[in-house]
Amino acid sequence: MNKDQLVRTAKAMVAAGKGILAADESTGTITKRFGALRIESTADARRDYRELLFRTKDAMEQYISGVILYDETIRQTAKDGTPLVKLIEAAGAIPGIKVDAGAKPLANFLGETITEGLDGLRERLSDYHGLGARFAKWRAVIQIGGGVPTDFAVEANARALARYAGLCQEAGIVPIVEPEVLMDGAHDLARCYDVTEFVLKTVFMELYKARVFLEGMILKPNMIVPGKACAAKASPEEVAQATIRVLRNCAPAAVPGVAFLSGGQSDVEATANLDAISRLGGPWALTFSYGRALQDAAQKAWAGQPENMRAAQAAFAHRARMNSLAAQGRWSEGEERTAA
């Protein structure tokens, strides 16, 4: 394990004013999103869409520190034959890769899942490192509901995250550790806090037991928000206070950065909440690792039509800039309207 290189990469991933573009949608997921816009999901269409994002010069160079890729994408080349990984590197961003095999039903635990993909991971990480990946992502999914999550489900997912993180660092790859407590359901802010606190404390205990080098990893947690079906909504200030409180109670200061997931929030909502969180701050760098909250507007503007490329790139650049401001605690609704 080259600890110095892991630290350098991790710090670059959470550089001030920059965040991570999650472009790691599986073929099934991006096909659904394309389908909603009546875009045919072919390998070329998926390549063209991601290429237009990676060629958005202003956004990539100024606001994006890294890009999480899917297995298909890390192996693709642009129309001119340039590997997509090289486009990312040319913009000064770091290529990364999603390595989990998705959340599967957890046997004997109705409504709960376990993320799979540890089998053969050491070999796959070596392959991905050779293709240019310098960080990776593994997502654990925790549902809130009647009787869930159970201790067993949380512990099983935490242990898998720890094993994944150790293998990544062995391969010279910075692990993004992503334990996501889902927004689905009618739970309130307090319930999200309690579950997230338990999940994070369990995850860091397993990371400790697995001897994971904390200075060479990034945490990607959910924000503390009410469930989508909860009648009591929370202001950005309430979200920020609860989120920073849970992180101070659970995340060691040795972790160089926290890159929040958007978790189904709207793009502006995710930006506003990130801004409020960043204004409170903490001992870690705070930034974003968004998928839909960075891409939705661009995807709709593109709609699969080559002539819409510039409009799509403008939408992506706008959203990236807004989140850059939010990560620095400098965003405002007025800035959002003025820049739109």
Image: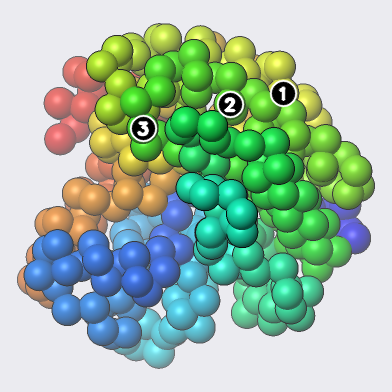
Relative height, residue 50 to residue 244 (above, below): below
Label 1 crowd bin: few (<14), some (14–19), many (20+), radius 10 Å = some
Closer-to-camera residue (241/106): 106
Q: Nearer the viewer, mark 2 or mark 1?
A: 2
Looking at this rendering, what residue extends furthest in the front direction?
Answer: 108
Label 1 or label 3, whichever comes before in sequence order: 3
Percent coordinates x, y for residue 202 in the rendering: 75, 34
The three-letter amino acid code for the residue at tag 2 is Val
Image quadrant in which the N terminus is located:
bottom right
Rendered image quadrant of residue 254:
top right
Label 2 or label 1, whichever comes before in sequence order: 2
Cα gap from disc 2 to disc 1, whole angstroms:
12 Å
Q: Secondary structure at mark 1?
A: helix
Q: For residue 192, which numbered disc appears in the image?
A: none
Name the side, left or right, on which 315 lies relative to 258.
Answer: left
Closer-to-camera residue (7/178): 178
Relative height, residue 59 to residue 221 (above, below): below
Cα gap from disc 2 to disc 3, whole angstroms:
13 Å
Q: Label 1 near label 2: C-beta < 8 Å?
A: no
Percent coordinates x, y for residue 263 in the rendering: 40, 40
Name the side, left or right, on which 165 lies relative to 33.
Answer: right
What residue appears at the point 34 percent right and 14 percent down from the top-left corner? 234
Rendered image quadrant of residue 108:
bottom right
Q: Secondary structure at mark 2?
A: helix
What residue appears at the point 71 percent right and 43 percent down from the top-left corner? 152
Percent coordinates x, y for residue 315 in the rendering: 20, 49
Image quadrant in which the C terminus is located:
top left
Q: For residue 250, which numbered disc appears in the image?
A: 1
What residue appears at the point 50 percent right and 83 percent down from the top-left corner? 75
List the residue tagged with mark 3: 185
The three-letter amino acid code for the residue at tag 3 is Gly
